[in-house]
Image (tube, rainbow, N blue to C red):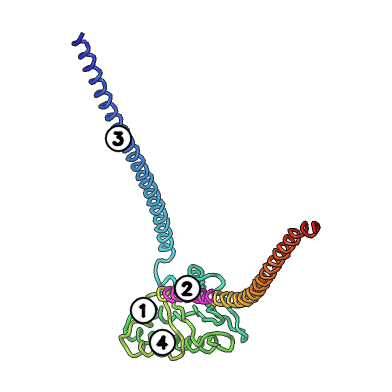
Amino acid sequence: MQFSHELDHNAQSIQQQLGQMLGHVNERLKDNAEVLSKTQQSLGERLDNAARVVGQVQRSLGGLEEANRRIYEVGKDIASLQEILRVPKLRGGLGEFFLEDLLGQILPPQHFATQYCFRSGDKVDAVIKLGASLVPVDAKFPLENFKRILDAVSDDDKNRAKKQFVSDVKKHIDAIAAKYILPDEGTYDFALMYIPAENVYYETIIKEDGAEEKHLSYYAMTKHVVPVSPNSFYAYLQAIVMGLRGMKIEDRAKEIIEYLSRLQGDFGKFREDFALLGKHLGHAQSGFQNADRRLEQFSQKLLAADADQNELCDFAPDSKAR
């Protein structure tokens, strides 16, 4: 009997220990399951992010491929500078097209206009609207003699063509200054001369290996005409965009200041009304206190009258007895 009792006790003890161990194992399995679930969730999120990144890269590659295809098509259409300069009318139209396209890519539509007409009847290729004033932009750059410079075989022919080209550019600068810099019609006191080819801009404005080129660049600035190439004009436009944002912020700041001024006036009126209300409340409080004192005095009088009446009542039986 004692052995059986001990055996049962040991069996119960073993079962309890097994139950505890099984509980610990279940808790560990539960913790591991939660960790595994979180790991799977994190791995799934990372896979989703990786899939999105891959998709974005694929779309970017597709856009890059499309851009390369367009550049290749443009390269096939524009094989050389000589092809661009072959027909003067086509050349002028192409320069105006590039100018309008560049303006449309960077500036909001309300801040520029093309083929702007002055009161004299002269039309400038484009104007940039900055506040209440205009910046004229001319794209009709004379390139005939520059083509002759490229086609010249001998140095003498090249020098003659270069002198003629410089003379043409000076005349064009004079025409821009005379026809388009019109402050009385709302323009600024300068204009932009758009040169549609980077190599022409370099040879005309940047390259200074002789007195003629230096004189030409200086001559343009003295006439308040600023030569720009597609790249430098892009930089000018970016600066203008920043200026427009600054003007917009300034206008918004003025509106906020005006609104704050109105709020200050409204606050002043509210302060006056609040002070008047305080006076009324003070008068009301004073009246209430006076009424309370009178009520207290009246209550005291009522109590005194009631006490006198009680005394009279106390003396009444004695008087009847007498």
Q: Amino acid at mark 2?
A: Val
Q: Amino acid at mark 4?
A: Val
- The first of marks 3 and 2 along the sequence is 3
Say if 29 sits above or below 81 in the image.
above
List the residue tagged with mark 2: 241
Image disc number at residue 166: 4
- The first of marks 4 and 1 along the sequence is 4
Along the viewing direction, whichever of 80 and 43 lies nearer the viewer: 43
- The first of marks 4 and 3 along the sequence is 3
Say if 249 sits above or below 22 in the image.
below
- Give the spatial CA distance, label 4 vs label 3: 84 Å
Q: Amino acid at mark 1?
A: Tyr
- Give the spatial CA distance, label 1 vs label 2: 25 Å
Q: Main secondary structure of the magenta part?
A: helix
Q: Nearer the viewer, mark 1 or mark 2?
A: 2
Residue 113 seen in this snapshot: no
Residues under numbered marks 4 and 2 in contact, where contact means CB atoms less than 8 Å apart:
no
State yes or no: residue 113 in magenta: no
- Which span is picked out in magenta? 234-253
Percent of width and height locating residue 10: 21, 17
Q: Residues within 10 Å of mark 2 (few under 14, many from 20)?
A: some
- Residue at x 46% of width, y 81% of height: 193
State yes or no: residue 251 in magenta: yes
Along the viewing direction, whichever of 251 and 179 lies nearer the viewer: 251
List the residue tagged with mark 3: 32
- The first of marks 1 and 2 along the sequence is 1
Which type of secondary structure does the marked residue at label 1 adopt? Answer: helix
- Give the spatial CA distance, label 3 vs label 2: 58 Å
Q: Residues within 10 Å of mark 4 (few under 14, many from 20)?
A: many
Residues under numbered marks 4 and 1 in contact, where contact means CB atoms less than 8 Å apart:
no
